Image: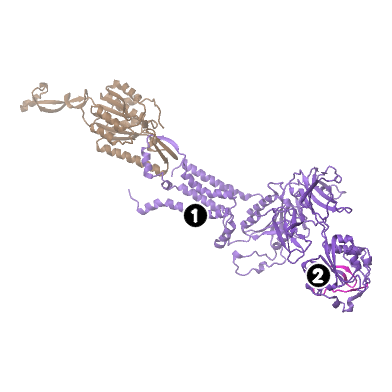
Chain colours: A brown, B purple
């Protein structure tokens, strides 16, 4: 059954304290826009030595390595690592199908988004959030710094389940709109009749560090239904008449497993990290254990 | 993953439809037997089963319940197919479900049925239940069980409606219970009795046959007599001699065709009597091996009925009839009776008569039944019941003695539990004259009687000379055709037996052929001179009202040896002389009577041979001879005919066939052929009412059949009956302990449904 507005607190202070220890990790190094706490592809003015290069006219003489010049009689310029901020995008599926389960999948997604966003904010990353169903519905412009946490939470609280989902359209719009590169976390049930492949390809094409977290409710993983039922799709009203029997349930579970396996394989081939979770897995454990294992946070 | 072999896959796929098919095939014989039972062919089916499989079956439920049960397996299948009402449920996405459905093709009929183990179990359970219900009996290893006889009374009083729907139906129900309470090892017999008794089903193990026999019993309007039923039951239980003696059993007899043999010492047999007990007690019967259980049917004696209806012509005015009706009140309350008499003359309604002042009770009130001491001196001693009767007299004037009058007496506004005796009929017919032929020389005393105007009213007399005996036109042909009721041979006789008339005869101073008087009197010892009259048979109808016959003086007579060849044994002697000599006796010839008088009235020379004509009793004797042997009927003294009695019909003339139309026959006539007899016997008098007799194509006569039986009208069931020395008290009706299986079967069906529900709501397989 769809879960109505759950006005629960997304993050509790104790959990926040634990999150402060973490940071988001990108397996790729991206260009940032502002000075941050991350290495940038750009060489810059940090204290960390990066490389040498030949001096060319016009270079800042302060960075000449005089010692090398003394030994080799050639001018080399010392290059230092540039530290920049990181783009961190959270995409939350708020289609109607996310309003299922206890807690609802949407609430769960919000909690994960809040936790990851908080980690990003603490580490001075540029955190952006988007809610989508068949398009982008709500957008949180880039925020930085711990002090912006309330904006993030406020944004998340205001996301309500609505509309059908069209993953492809939504991610296409997102890809065209967002210019920066960075980490993208997609929180969705990925139960889109249009398929996920095309949608994910848009993200992959952006050369971003992509994390796909598929959230399903326990009812979807282990259906607790009996008898003769008319199943109605909450998003498009599609109807399926079923008579629940052992073979049917077995077949359903097989199909679900095959779907997950397909998704996993698709992601693995494209360097996308895929994580499957149920709404019954405590979200703090997801963040502190599973995402750590997958290398999103450390 | 290990791939299963193709064979295993095929088996896994096919086992369910195969199992379903096997179950349906298993159900086929049961279904066929059920259908045969519904069509009423259970007996034929059982016969076939016994011959081929030594099995028999019986479905002890009504046909509709059988039909329902038969439909249960189909119903279960249908329930599985027609689970149309689906519960709506919203899901996040039907995406995976649709895919699963497509994979399984679950909405396809047979795919859906796939591996539904519960369906198999349910159908199996119902099929087993079905066969259990048929209660198959294996024959062949039969141990000899008990013997029992069901005696069901279907007399008129059993139609009383004091128990719903009537007593007979209640009796049948009780009898069926008794059959159900016995096993197929027991041997049962069904006897139905009323005024007679009939074995509807002789001894059999087949309870289906017994049931059919009991169910086939129909009510009659006859009176009740138990004797015949007892003697039927007596045959096997208390054999005197029997060809079915166990000693006569042939060696190596096929058990399936074996007859029922009687043990030489007789078989202890239980007799279940279902009756209201309103029959005369049977005094000369010994129950012996019969152990009688009597179940009284009915609850009370709420009845008022006509028990007598007769008429008499006014001596002074032949056209005036006095009709008497007696009404008995069997109720325990006084009752005021209104009775009326509807009179039809020659088929046309004439009038409805009210009774004249009733005897002793002017307003028609009849007292209630009373219980009085048998002996007045002992008020606390045994008591007997007194039923009060009211007599009502009607006077019907101006009834032509040649008119056919039908009277219908009816109780008005009388509502009781036994309507059959609320009406009665009386037919006052045309006076039937005797057709008398007198052959012989002149005989003044005889002709003086027959020519008297009073005799002429009841007899038409023809005189012939002895010479005419050989005349085919005058005597031989008419005699053979039954043209006369009485032929008087005065000192003459036909030569051969073939010339004897189809009529009663009176031989005066002669003997009927083949004997000849001339041969008898050759022996002088056979000629008697002055034989005295020593004795006479007062009970004979011919000598009724005759006294002082010893005053008859006879000059000569002859002795006829009643022990001679050809003389029937125990010939009635009407007048006896000494030395064991009969002067007047009757010989029976087919249905006729030959009255033989061994002395002449007048001698051939015109002198009196006896002084009898001078005595008062002579014309009385002639009157009796004319009425009895001449079949005179004065129209009002119609013999009483009760339902089931044989009515003898004597047309006024020689006709070959007659037709009888019954009261409820809808105008359909029953034709009777003469077959060499002057009269016709009509046995189909099953219904009360007026029967019309026709010959020559038009209605000639009517006769009435009435219950008019005070015992039968007394519908208060007796609590105790007496047979021989035994008194049998009415017992309790049999409970039906064996009926509990029906509830168990019903429970099984409910369990099946429950199982179905649980399966579909809570459990997966």
Question: Where in the figure is residue B18, as x and y percent of width and height?
Answer: 43, 53
Residue under label 2, please give it. Answer: B474
Question: Where in the figure is residue B505, as x and y percent of width and height?
Answer: 83, 68
Question: Where in the figure is residue A92, as x and y percent of width and height?
Answer: 32, 29
Residue under label 1, please give it. Answer: B26
Left or right: residue B119 versus residue B38 is left
In the image, farthest residue toward the left? A73
Q: Nearer the viewer, residue A296 or B77?
A: B77
Q: What element carries label 1?
A: helix
Q: Judge whether A204 appears above or below B119 on screen.
A: above
Looking at the image, can residue B512 be seen? no
- Label 2 packing within 10 angstroms: few (<14), some (14-19), many (20+): few
Q: Do the residues indicated by labels 1 and 2 lie within the same chain of the protein?
A: yes
Q: Judge whether B344 appears above or below B531 on screen.
A: above
Q: Which of B223 and A18 is in front in this view?
A: B223
Mark 1 or 2: in front is: 2
Question: What segment carries the magenta color?
Answer: B555-583
Q: Are marks 1 and 2 in contact (CB under 8 Å)?
A: no
Quadrant that contains the C terminus of chain A: top left
Q: Which of A1 and B695 is in front in this view?
A: B695
* Residue B374 counted in the magenta span: no
In percent of the image, x 23 and y 28: which residue is there? A181
Q: Residue B220 carries which label?
A: none
Measured in 3D between alpha carbons, the distance from the residue under mark 1 to the one under mark 2, in whole angstroms, is: 83 Å
In percent of the image, x 85 and y 72: which residue is there? B466
């Amino acid at each position: 059954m769809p879960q109505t507005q759950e006005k629960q607190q997304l993050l509790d202070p104790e959990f926040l304290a634990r999150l402060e220890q973490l940071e988001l990790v990108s397996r790729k190094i991206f260009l940032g826009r502002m000075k941050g706490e991350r290495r940038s592809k750009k060489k810059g003015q940090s204290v960390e030595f990066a490389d040498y290069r030949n001096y060319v006219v016009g270079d800042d003489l302060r960075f000449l390595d005089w010692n090398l010049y003394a030994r080799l009689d050639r001018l080399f310029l010392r290059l230092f690592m540039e530290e920049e901020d990181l783009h961190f995008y959270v995409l939350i599926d708020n289609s109607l199908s996310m309003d299922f389960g206890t807690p609802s999948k949407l609430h769960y997604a919000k909690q994960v988004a809040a936790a990851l966003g908080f980690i990003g904010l603490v580490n001075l990353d540029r955190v952006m959030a988007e809610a989508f169903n068949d398009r982008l519905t709500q957008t949180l412009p880039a925020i930085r710094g711990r002090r912006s946490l309330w904006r993030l939470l406020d944004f998340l609280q205001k996301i309500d389940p609505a509309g059908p989902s069209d993953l492809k359209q939504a991610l296409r719009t997102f890809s065209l709109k967002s210019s920066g590169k960075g980490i993208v976390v997609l929180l969705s049930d990925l139960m889109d009749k249009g398929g996920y492949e095309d949608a994910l390809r848009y993200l992959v094409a952006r050369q971003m560090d992509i994390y796909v977290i598929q959230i399903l409710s326990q009812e979807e993983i282990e259906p607790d239904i009996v008898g003769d039922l008319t199943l109605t799709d909450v998003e498009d009203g599609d109807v399926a008449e079923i008579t629940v029997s052992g073979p049917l349930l077995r077949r359903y579970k097989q199909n679900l497993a095959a779907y997950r396996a397909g998704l996993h394989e698709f992601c693995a081939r494209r360097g996308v990290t895929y994580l499957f979770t149920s709404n019954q897995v405590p979200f703090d454990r997801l963040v502190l254990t599973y995402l750590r294992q997958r290398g999103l946070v450390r | 993953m290990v791939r299963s072999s193709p064979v295993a896959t095929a088996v896994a796929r096919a086992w369910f439809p195969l199992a379903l098919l096997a179950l349906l095939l298993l159900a086929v014989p049961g279904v066929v037997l059920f259908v045969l039972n519904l069509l009423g062919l259970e007996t034929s089916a059982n016969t076939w089963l016994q011959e081929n499989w030594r099995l028999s079956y019986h479905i002890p439920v009504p046909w509709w319940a059988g039909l329902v049960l038969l439909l249960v397996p189909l119903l279960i299948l249908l329930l599985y197919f027609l689970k149309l009402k689906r519960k709506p449920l919203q899901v996040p996405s039907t995406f995976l479900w649709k895919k699963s459905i497509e994979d399984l093709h679950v909405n396809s009929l047979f795919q859906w049925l796939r591996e539904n183990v519960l369906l198999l179990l349910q159908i199996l359970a119902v099929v087993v239940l079905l066969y259990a219900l048929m209660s198959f009996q294996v024959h062949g290893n039969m141990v000899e069980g008990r013997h029992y006889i069901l005696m069901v009374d279907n007399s008129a009083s059993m139609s009383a409606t004091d128990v719903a729907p009537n007593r007979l139906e209640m009796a049948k129900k009780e009898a069926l219970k008794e059959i159900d309470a016995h096993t197929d090892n027991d041997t049962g017999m069904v006897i139905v009795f009323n005024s007679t008794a009939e074995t509807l089903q002789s001894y059999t193990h087949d309870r289906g046959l017994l049931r059919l026999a009991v169910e086939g019993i129909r009510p009659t309007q006859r009176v009740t007599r138990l004797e015949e039923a007892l003697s039927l039951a007596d045959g096997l239980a208390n054999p005197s001699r029997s060809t079915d003696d166990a000693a006569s059993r042939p060696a190596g007899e096929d058990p399936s065709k074996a007859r029922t043999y009687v043990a030489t010492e007789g078989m202890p047999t239980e007799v279940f009597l279902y009756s209201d007990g309103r029959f005369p007690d049977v005094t000369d019967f010994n129950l012996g091996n019969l152990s009688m259980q009597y179940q009284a049917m009915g609850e009370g004696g709420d009845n008022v009925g006509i028990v007598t209806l007769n008429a008499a012509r006014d001596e002074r005015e032949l056209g005036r009839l006095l009709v008497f009706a007696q009404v008995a009140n069997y109720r325990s309350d006084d009752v005021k009776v209104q009775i009326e008499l509807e009179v039809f003359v020659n088929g046309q309604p004439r009038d409805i008569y009210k009774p004249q002042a009733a005897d002793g009770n002017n307003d028609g009130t009849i007292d209630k039944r009373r219980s009085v001491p048998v002996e007045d001196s002992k008020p606390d001693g045994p008591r007997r019941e007194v039923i009060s009767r009211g007599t009502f007299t009607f006077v019907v004037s101006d009834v032509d003695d040649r008119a056919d009058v039908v009277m219908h007496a009816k109780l008005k506004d009388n509502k009781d539990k036994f309507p059959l005796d609320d009406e009665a009929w009386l037919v006052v017919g045309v006076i039937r004259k005797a057709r008398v032929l007198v052959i012989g020389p002149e005989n003044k005393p005889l002709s003086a009687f027959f020519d008297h105007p009073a005799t002429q009213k009841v007899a038409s007399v023809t005189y012939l000379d002895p010479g005419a005996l050989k005349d085919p036109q005058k005597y031989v042909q008419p005699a053979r055709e039954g043209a006369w009721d009485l032929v008087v041979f005065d000192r003459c006789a036909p030569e051969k037996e073939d010339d004897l008339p189809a009529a009663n005869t009176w031989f005066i101073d002669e003997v009927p052929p083949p004997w000849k008087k001339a041969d008898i009197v050759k022996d002088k010892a056979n000629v008697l001179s002055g034989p005295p009259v020593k004795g006479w048979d007062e009970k004979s109808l011919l000598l009724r009202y005759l006294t002082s016959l010893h005053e008859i003086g006879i000059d000569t007579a002859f002795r006829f040896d009643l022990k001679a060849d050809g003389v029937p044994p125990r010939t009635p002697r009407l007048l006896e002389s000494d030395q064991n000599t009969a002067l007047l006796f009757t010989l029976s010839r087919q249905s006729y009577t030959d009255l033989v008088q061994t002395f002449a009235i007048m001698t051939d020379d015109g002198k009196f041979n006896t002084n009898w004509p001078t005595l008062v009793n002579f014309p009385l004797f002639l009157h009796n001879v004319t009425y009895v042997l001449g079949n005179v009927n004065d129209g009002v003294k119609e013999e009483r005919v009760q339902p089931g009695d044989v009515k003898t019909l004597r047309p006024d003339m020689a006709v070959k066939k007659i037709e009888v139309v019954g009261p409820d026959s809808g105008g359909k006539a029953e034709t009777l052929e003469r077959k060499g007899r002057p009269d016709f016997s009509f046995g189909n008098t099953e219904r009360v009412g007026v029967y019309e007799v026709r010959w020559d194509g038009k209605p000639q006569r009517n006769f009435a059949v009435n219950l008019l039986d005070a015992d039968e009208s007394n519908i208060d069931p007796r609590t105790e009956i007496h047979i021989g020395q035994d008194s049998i008290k009415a017992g309790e009706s049999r409970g039906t302990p064996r009926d509990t299986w029906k509830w168990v079967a019903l429970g099984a069906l409910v369990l099946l449904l429950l199982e179905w529900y649980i399966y579909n709501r809570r459990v997966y397989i």
